[in-house]
Amino acid sequence: VQLQASGGGMVQAGGSLRLSCAASGRGFSIGAMAWYRQAPEKQRELVATISSRGTTSYVDSVKGRFTISRDNSKNTVYLQMNNLKPEDTAVYYCNAGADTGTAYRQYWGQGTLVTVSS
Protein backbone atom coordinates (compact mmCIF):
# COMPACT_ATOMS: atom_id res chain seq x y z
CA VAL A 1 0.00 0.00 0.00
CA GLN A 2 1.34 3.42 -0.96
CA LEU A 3 -0.01 6.78 0.14
CA GLN A 4 0.54 9.83 -2.05
CA ALA A 5 -0.17 13.19 -0.49
CA SER A 6 -0.59 16.46 -2.35
CA GLY A 7 -2.00 19.95 -1.99
CA GLY A 8 0.47 21.68 0.27
CA GLY A 9 1.82 25.13 -0.44
CA MET A 10 2.23 28.64 0.84
CA VAL A 11 -0.73 30.78 1.81
CA GLN A 12 -1.36 33.94 3.79
CA ALA A 13 -3.07 33.85 7.16
CA GLY A 14 -6.81 33.51 6.70
CA GLY A 15 -6.43 31.58 3.49
CA SER A 16 -7.38 28.03 2.62
CA LEU A 17 -5.75 24.89 1.31
CA ARG A 18 -7.03 21.40 0.55
CA LEU A 19 -4.81 18.40 1.07
CA SER A 20 -5.41 15.06 -0.62
CA CYS A 21 -3.97 11.64 0.02
CA ALA A 22 -4.64 8.66 -2.22
CA ALA A 23 -3.91 5.06 -1.33
CA SER A 24 -2.83 2.70 -4.09
CA GLY A 25 -1.85 -0.89 -4.39
CA ARG A 26 -3.57 -4.25 -4.68
CA GLY A 27 -5.49 -6.49 -2.38
CA PHE A 28 -6.11 -4.18 0.54
CA SER A 29 -8.99 -2.66 2.43
CA ILE A 30 -8.54 0.77 3.98
CA GLY A 31 -9.80 1.37 7.49
CA ALA A 32 -9.38 4.56 9.49
CA MET A 33 -7.48 7.43 7.90
CA ALA A 34 -5.87 10.45 9.51
CA TRP A 35 -3.78 13.54 9.06
CA TYR A 36 -0.82 14.36 11.28
CA ARG A 37 1.49 17.35 11.19
CA GLN A 38 4.96 18.14 12.42
CA ALA A 39 6.19 21.67 12.88
CA PRO A 40 9.92 22.46 13.10
CA GLU A 41 11.42 21.24 16.35
CA LYS A 42 8.09 19.86 17.53
CA GLN A 43 6.69 16.37 17.85
CA ARG A 44 4.32 14.95 15.29
CA GLU A 45 0.73 15.84 16.20
CA LEU A 46 -2.53 14.12 15.31
CA VAL A 47 -4.72 16.66 13.53
CA ALA A 48 -7.83 14.79 12.42
CA THR A 49 -9.13 11.27 11.97
CA ILE A 50 -11.94 9.68 10.03
CA SER A 51 -13.22 6.15 10.42
CA SER A 52 -14.22 3.90 7.55
CA ARG A 53 -17.83 4.91 8.23
CA GLY A 54 -17.10 8.62 8.33
CA THR A 55 -16.86 9.37 12.03
CA THR A 56 -14.47 12.27 12.52
CA SER A 57 -12.42 13.77 15.30
CA TYR A 58 -10.14 16.81 15.51
CA VAL A 59 -7.49 18.28 17.73
CA ASP A 60 -8.92 21.28 19.55
CA SER A 61 -6.70 23.80 17.75
CA VAL A 62 -8.27 23.08 14.35
CA LYS A 63 -11.89 22.52 15.30
CA GLY A 64 -14.19 24.72 13.26
CA ARG A 65 -11.45 25.44 10.70
CA PHE A 66 -10.40 22.06 9.29
CA THR A 67 -12.62 19.35 7.79
CA ILE A 68 -11.51 15.80 7.11
CA SER A 69 -13.40 13.73 4.58
CA ARG A 70 -12.88 10.63 2.47
CA ASP A 71 -13.96 9.07 -0.78
CA ASN A 72 -13.93 5.34 -0.26
CA SER A 73 -14.39 4.66 -3.97
CA LYS A 74 -11.05 6.37 -4.57
CA ASN A 75 -9.31 5.32 -1.33
CA THR A 76 -8.63 9.00 -0.80
CA VAL A 77 -8.72 11.22 2.27
CA TYR A 78 -8.94 15.00 2.19
CA LEU A 79 -8.22 17.79 4.63
CA GLN A 80 -9.91 21.09 3.91
CA MET A 81 -8.12 23.79 5.86
CA ASN A 82 -9.78 27.18 6.20
CA ASN A 83 -8.83 30.32 8.12
CA LEU A 84 -5.24 29.13 8.27
CA LYS A 85 -2.95 30.56 10.93
CA PRO A 86 0.85 30.83 11.04
CA GLU A 87 0.87 28.18 13.77
CA ASP A 88 -0.60 25.71 11.24
CA THR A 89 2.73 25.79 9.41
CA ALA A 90 4.05 22.23 9.33
CA VAL A 91 4.67 19.18 7.21
CA TYR A 92 1.37 17.33 6.98
CA TYR A 93 1.37 13.54 6.78
CA CYS A 94 -1.50 11.25 5.91
CA ASN A 95 -1.91 7.95 7.64
CA ALA A 96 -4.10 4.96 6.89
CA GLY A 97 -4.74 1.59 8.40
CA ALA A 98 -5.04 -1.15 5.84
CA ASP A 99 -5.96 -4.81 5.92
CA THR A 100 -3.82 -6.60 3.38
CA GLY A 101 -5.44 -9.96 4.00
CA THR A 102 -2.61 -11.21 6.15
CA ALA A 103 -2.13 -8.29 8.50
CA TYR A 104 -3.53 -4.90 9.53
CA ARG A 105 -0.82 -2.27 9.26
CA GLN A 106 -0.37 1.48 9.41
CA TYR A 107 0.91 3.29 6.35
CA TRP A 108 2.26 6.81 5.94
CA GLY A 109 2.38 9.27 3.07
CA GLN A 110 5.51 11.21 2.23
CA GLY A 111 4.40 14.52 3.77
CA THR A 112 3.39 17.79 2.18
CA LEU A 113 4.56 21.18 3.43
CA VAL A 114 2.05 23.83 4.43
CA THR A 115 3.43 27.30 5.09
CA VAL A 116 1.18 30.05 6.44
CA SER A 117 2.58 33.58 6.45
CA SER A 118 1.33 36.34 8.72
Image (cartoon, rainbow, N blue to C red):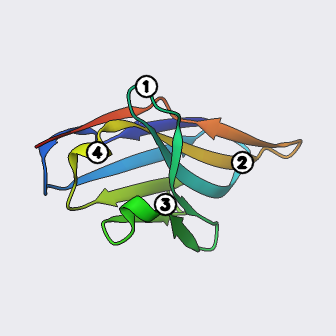
Of the image marks 3 and 1, the number of the one nearer the N terminus: 1
C-alpha gap between disc 4 and disc 3: 14 Å
Tell me which label, 4 or 2, sits earlier in the chain: 4
Residue 10 higher or lower than 64, as above or below: above
Which residue is tagged 3?
Answer: 59
Q: Nearer the viewer, mark 2 or mark 3?
A: 3
List the residue tagged with mark 2: 98
Q: Nearer the viewer, mark 4 or mark 2?
A: 4
**Amino acid carrying mark 2 in the image:** Ala
What type is the residue that disc 1 sits on? Glu
Q: Give the CA separation, mark 2 to mark 3.
A: 23 Å
Q: Which mark is residue 87?
A: 4
In the figure, is residue 90 to the left or right of 84? Answer: right
Can residue 1 be seen from the camera position used here? no
Q: Residues within 10 Å of mark 1 (few under 14, many from 20)?
A: few
Residue annotated with mark 1 = 41
Other residues around mark 4 within 10 Å, as few (<14) / some (14–19) / many (≥20):
few
